[in-house]
């Protein structure tokens, strides 16, 4: 503890300065606000335009599956070896969380068969709730 002299007496300062602690908390808050949207989107895709406003979903129940225009599959940002590997991972995720909602992000320039393969793999394993990611239409 620091001691300050006041009128020729030593007084102990018992107060904690919380300003640096608040600065740290605000910096961490800003970092989380900036990085959270990036966690959902692991690869750069041109999403199709259309759809309505997204309903609010519980983030712990949403699993993001993505496919690029070249047919490479990603699950939670991790590259999958193929549709068979993706299907195995989906099966395990659904076993852990039966309230699972599969969010499919596919490039608008890619082939239609890639997102359909994801949907087929999910349905074979009991996943019936889907959310297709789109961009909001420009007005």
Image (cartoon, grey):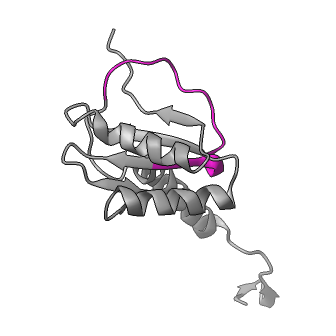
- In screen coordinates, is 82 left or right of 37? left
Q: Is residue 51 in the magenta section? A: yes
Q: Is residue 93 in the magenta section? A: no
Residue located at (25% from left, 46% from top): 68
Main SS class of the magenta portion in the image: loop
- Of 35 and 133, nearer the camera is 133
Residue located at (31% from left, 47% from top): 67
Vertical order, 95 against 123 (above or below):
below
Vertical order, 32 against 5 (above or below):
above
Residue that sits furthest to the top in the current view: 139
Vertical order, 130 against 21 (above or below):
above
Q: Quadrant of residue 21?
A: bottom right
Query: Where residue 64 appears, x then y in whole percent?
Result: 47, 48
Q: Is residue 7 visible?
A: yes
Q: Which residues are magenta?
A: 48-64
Q: Is residue 76 visible?
A: no
Query: Where residue 108 appears, x then y in whole percent?
Result: 25, 31
Q: Quadrant of residue 86?
A: bottom left
- In screen coordinates, is 58 left or right of 72? right
Residue located at (73% from left, 90% from top): 1
Which quadrant holds the C terminus? Answer: top left
């Amino acid at each position: 503890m620091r001691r300050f002299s006041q009128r020729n007496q030593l007084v102990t300062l018992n107060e904690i300065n919380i300003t640096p602690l608040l600065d740290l908390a605000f910096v961490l808050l800003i970092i989380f606000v900036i990085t959270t949207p990036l966690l959902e989107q692991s690869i750069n895709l041109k999403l199709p335009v259309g759809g309505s406003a997204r309903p609010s979903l519980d983030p712990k129940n949403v699993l993001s599956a993505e496919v690029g225009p070249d047919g490479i599959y990603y699950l939670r940002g991790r590259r999958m070896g193929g549709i068979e590997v993706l299907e195995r991972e989906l099966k395990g995720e659904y076993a852990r969380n039966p309230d699972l909602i599969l969010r499919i992000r596919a490039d608008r320039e890619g082939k239609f068969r890639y997102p359909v393969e994801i949907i087929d793999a999910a349905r074979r394993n009991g996943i019936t709730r889907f959310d297709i990611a789109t961009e909001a239409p420009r007005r």
